[in-house]
Image (spheres, helix red, strand yellow):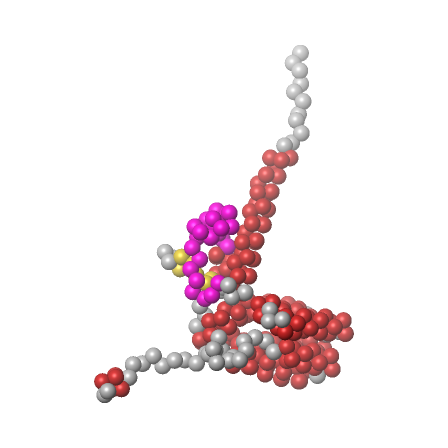
């Protein structure tokens, strides 16, 4: 009589291997994406910086294939420019694009504070005020990088509080690209570059009072002043030949 071969339990490790591998690689990809993204937002990687695959892959201890996926994601977020046979580099927004960005922010954030006036509660106002306090402390300590991050977070959190996910999604993309514009076109004649904490406080005051008109007006003025800190003037590159040869 032939002995019946007992069935072995399924190899759980083998079955889970591909999924586990995908999970680990996905985690690595997210981590590298976040580190490069943060370096761009923190102004440690200025516009135009070449992102060479080999040294970056070696730095992060990942394959070039995984790094390419990260760079593609950053390109979709419009933080990186990718061109065939020319590699990737940190995006350099044009003057026209930068102006459009602020015009879009004024339209979207005006709508956001208008909606927020009807939806925001006392607990959310307290959260905003605590954020403003941390932001002020960072600037007082001359921790500019931390202050800029907190400034951006104020706008992002306010959009989330308004509860319109479509507007919040649009704004999130614009906020992600704003530091690139600031770094590319910072006007050396400006005394400061960044959000005005007092404006943030005034916006919170208007929201608490339920004054939508005031909140929209303050937000619009706030963003106009932020844009005004940048040198977004089109320079005339035409060479004046008569002036050159009349000397």
For residue 180, above or below residue 210: above
For residue 110, above or below residue 29: below
Direction from residue 204 to residue 87 in the image, left or right: left
Residue depicted at x 55% and y 57%: 35
69 is within the stretch colored magenta = yes
Q: Where is residue 29 shown, x and y percent of the image?
A: 54, 51
Q: Where is residue 234 shown, x and y percent of the image?
A: 41, 80
Residue depicted at x 71% and y 74%: 129
Most foreground residue, 36 or 73: 36
Direction from residue 166 to residue 179 in the image, left or right: left
Q: Where is residue 188 shown, x and y percent of the image?
A: 47, 77
Residue 244 seen by the camera: yes
Direction from residue 90 to residue 12 in the image, left or right: right
Residue depicted at x 63% and y 71%: 141
Direction from residue 180 to residue 202 in the image, left or right: right
Most foreground residue, 94 or 198: 198
Q: Residue furthest top?
A: 1
Specify the quadrant that holds the N terminus.
top right
Specify the quadrant that holds the C terminus.
bottom left
Residue 66 seen by the camera: no
Location of residue 197 by image quarter: bottom right
Residue depicted at x 38% and y 80%: 235
111 is within the stretch colored magenta = no
Which stretch is magenta? 45-70
């Amino acid at each position: 009589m032939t002995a019946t071969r007992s069935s072995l339990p399924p190899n759980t490790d083998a079955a889970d291997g591909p999924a586990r591998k995908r999970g680990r690689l996905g985690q690595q990809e997210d981590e590298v994406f976040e580190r490069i993204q943060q370096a761009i937002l923190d102004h440690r990687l200025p516009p135009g910086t070449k992102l060479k695959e080999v040294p970056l892959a070696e730095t992060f201890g990942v394959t070039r294939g995984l790094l390419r996926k990260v760079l593609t994601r950053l390109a979709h977020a419009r933080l990186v420019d990718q061109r065939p046979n020319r590699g990737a580099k940190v995006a350099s927004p044009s003057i026209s694009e930068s102006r459009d960005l602020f015009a879009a922010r004024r339209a979207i954030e005006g709508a956001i504070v208008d909606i927020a006036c009807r939806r925001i509660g006392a607990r959310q106002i307290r959260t905003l005020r605590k954020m403003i306090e941390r932001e002020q402390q960072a600037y007082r300590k001359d921790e500019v990088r931390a202050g800029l991050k907190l400034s951006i977070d104020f706008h992002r959190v306010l959009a989330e509080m308004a509860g319109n996910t479509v507007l919040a999604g649009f704004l999130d993309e614009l906020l992600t690209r704003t530091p690139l514009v600031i770094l590319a076109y910072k006007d050396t004649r400006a005394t400061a570059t960044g959000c005005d904490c007092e404006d943030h406080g005034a916006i919170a005051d208007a929201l608490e009072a339920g004054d939508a008109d005031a909140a929209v007006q303050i937000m619009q003025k706030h963003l106009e002043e932020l844009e005004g800190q940048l040198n977004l003037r089109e320079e005339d590159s035409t060479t004046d030949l008569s002036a050159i040869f009349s000397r």
